[in-house]
């Protein structure tokens, strides 16, 4: 019985151990797929390299793919090599077992083996948070009928820039120095051989193997590669040149809107300075505008290009765009520029309020002041003035020129009405509880023996506001009338 219990205990222990191992294995697999978590990174690299002749160059792609912004953490590397050769980065010769700092996220090392054999290059990379990666490259070098080398392409390369590579072929002692040909097999751009445009897939004889040139130009940015073949009567060898092409920039140096509050159907303008960096001889750009928000849900209430690019020829980097604000509302207008390579600028946004050309703000109110005077057998009635509270506001270039007041009231069945004007000449009219002095305006005379109607208790105050652009607004309100003896 004890033997059975021991076997059961052993079985349970083995089962728990297996479960624990599987759990740790799963955890480990998850951690690896995250490249070390928040501060982890992976290496994007080439894995296949063709055999080179001694003295030929291998380009090694070595791109760092971090889980964070590359520039926020210092990243360093060291390398070792089992055989003699020269390793360069950005044209600088590197020493084994010496620590260097990556200045770019995407890198291309250049290695030239000086002896035959399998050159094993080992890189150790780490960042400031302690995350590290090791990468190993196997580069085979051997004896060949010829060696091919080139110089060039070490300077910064921008889109559309021409890069000239000066090449040469060095045959070994038993190989004829004639009969060499070059064929370009793939490149996303234009190629020139000895200054003459070349065609992909066509062979070109190399008349001077000691010095010939290949010129490359591309409009794309990022990492690109030229693939080509050099051959003689007996041997054909494949080569490549890797390039890192810098994207040009289009920069909105300044962009100004002529007004942010306008009236409907107002002509508006955006002006500014837009530059290409580095500059090119092409002064044409593209631009687009669109509305991202509107208070009335009408994206067409301001004229735009409807988010479609339109060509524009600048003069001395100056830009000007005319458009109209059509309907009342509040809007967000966006602007973006693009260069000939498809690079886009930052987005500039402007808030625009389209208000009526002229409008009343707040409530209109007032009162009318009437007086009477008894002289002998006569009663004379006078208008002495009126009080008013009103506010009117214009928009854009519209100015208020004057205001007309009409006050009226009924006395019995008789209507009495009088007009008065006031000059303004400004963007707004703001009158709060002020009295307009009319002077003594005689409006009725009665005999004390007449049947005199009861005095008025209310009347009408009508206000009309006029502008320099022809717009007019009016409003009327019932107001109290005071009637007292002088």
Image (cartoon, helix red, strand yellow):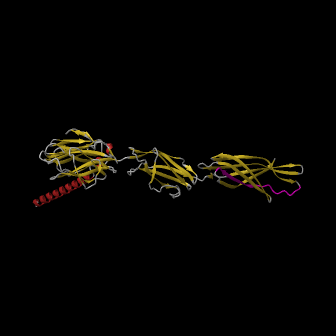
289 with respect to 165 (left or right): right
The residue that appears at 25% across and 47% down in the rendered structure is 62
Q: Quadrant of residue 164?
A: top left
The quarter of the image holding the N terminus is bottom left
Residue 105 makes an appearance in the image: no
- Comparing 142 with 414, the one in front is 142
192 with respect to 273 (left or right): left
The residue that appears at 47% across and 51% down in the rendered structure is 334
309 part of magenta stretch? no
Q: Quadrant of residue 93?
A: top left
Q: Position of residue 77 (x, y in %)?
A: 24, 42
Q: Position of residue 263 (x, y in %)?
A: 58, 52
59 with respect to 158 (left or right): left
- Comparing 222 with 132, the one in front is 222
The residue that appears at 71% across and 51% down in the rendered structure is 404
- Comparing 45 with 480, the one in front is 45
Q: Quadrant of residue 462?
A: bottom right
Q: Position of residue 255 (x, y in %)?
A: 48, 46
Residue 164 makes an appearance in the image: yes
Q: Which residues are magenta?
A: 449-468
- Number of labels in the image equals 0
465 part of magenta stretch? yes
């Amino acid at each position: 019985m004890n033997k059975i219990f021991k076997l059961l205990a052993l079985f349970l222990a083995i089962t728990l151990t297996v479960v624990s191992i599987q759990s740790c294995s799963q955890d480990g697999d998850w951690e690896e797929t995250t490249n070390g978590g928040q501060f982890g990174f992976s290496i994007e690299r080439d894995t296949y390299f063709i055999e080179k002749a001694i003295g030929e160059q291998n380009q090694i792609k070595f791109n760092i793919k971090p889980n964070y912004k590359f520039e926020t953490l210092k990243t360093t590397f060291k390398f070792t090599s089992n055989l003699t050769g020269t390793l360069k980065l950005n044209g600088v010769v590197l020493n084994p077992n010496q620590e260097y700092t990556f200045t770019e996220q995407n890198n291309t090392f250049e290695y030239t083996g000086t002896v035959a054999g399998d050159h094993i290059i080992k890189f150790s990379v780490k960042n400031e948070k302690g995350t590290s990666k090791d990468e190993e490259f196997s580069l085979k070098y051997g004896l060949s009928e010829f060696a091919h080398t080139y110089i060039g392409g070490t300077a910064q390369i921008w889109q559309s820039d021409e890069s000239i590579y000066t090449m040469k072929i060095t045959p070994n002692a038993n190989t004829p120095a004639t009969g060499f040909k070059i064929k370009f097999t793939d490149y996303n751009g234009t190629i020139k051989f000895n200054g003459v445009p070349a065609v992909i897939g066509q062979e070109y004889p190399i008349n001077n193997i000691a010095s010939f040139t290949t010129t490359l130009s591309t409009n794309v940015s990022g990492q690109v590669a030229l693939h080509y073949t050099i051959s003689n009567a007996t041997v054909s060898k494949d080569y490549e040149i890797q390039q890192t092409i810098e994207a040009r920039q289009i920069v909105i140096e300044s962009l100004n809107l002529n007004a942010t509050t306008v009236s409907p159907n107002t002509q508006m303008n955006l002006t500014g300075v837009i530059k290409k960096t580095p500059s090119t001889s092409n002064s044409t750009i593209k631009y687009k505008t669109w509305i991202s928000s509107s208070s009335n849900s009408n994206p067409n209430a301001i004229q735009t290009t409807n988010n479609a690019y339109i060509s524009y020829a600048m003069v001395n980097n100056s830009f000007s765009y005319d458009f109209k604000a059509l309907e009342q509302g509040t809007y967000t207008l966006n602007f973006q520029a693009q260069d000939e390579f498809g690079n886009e600028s930052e987005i500039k946004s402007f808030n625009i309020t389209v208000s009526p050309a002229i409008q009343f703000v707040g409530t209109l109110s007032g009162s009318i002041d009437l007086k009477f005077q008894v002289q002998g057998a006569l009663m004379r009635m006078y208008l002495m003035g009126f009080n008013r509270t009103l506010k009117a506001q214009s928009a854009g270039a519209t100015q208020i020129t004057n205001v007309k007041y009409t006050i009226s009231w009924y006395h019995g069945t008789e209507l009495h009405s009088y007009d008065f004007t006031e000059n303004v000449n400004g963007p707004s009219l703001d009158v709060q509880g002020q009295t307009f002095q009319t002077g003594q305006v005689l409006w009725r005379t009665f005999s004390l023996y007449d049947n005199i109607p009861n005095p008025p208790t209310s009347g009408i105050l009508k206000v009309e506001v006029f502008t320099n652009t022809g717009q007019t607004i009016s409003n009327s309100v019932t107001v109290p009338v005071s009637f007292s003896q002088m």
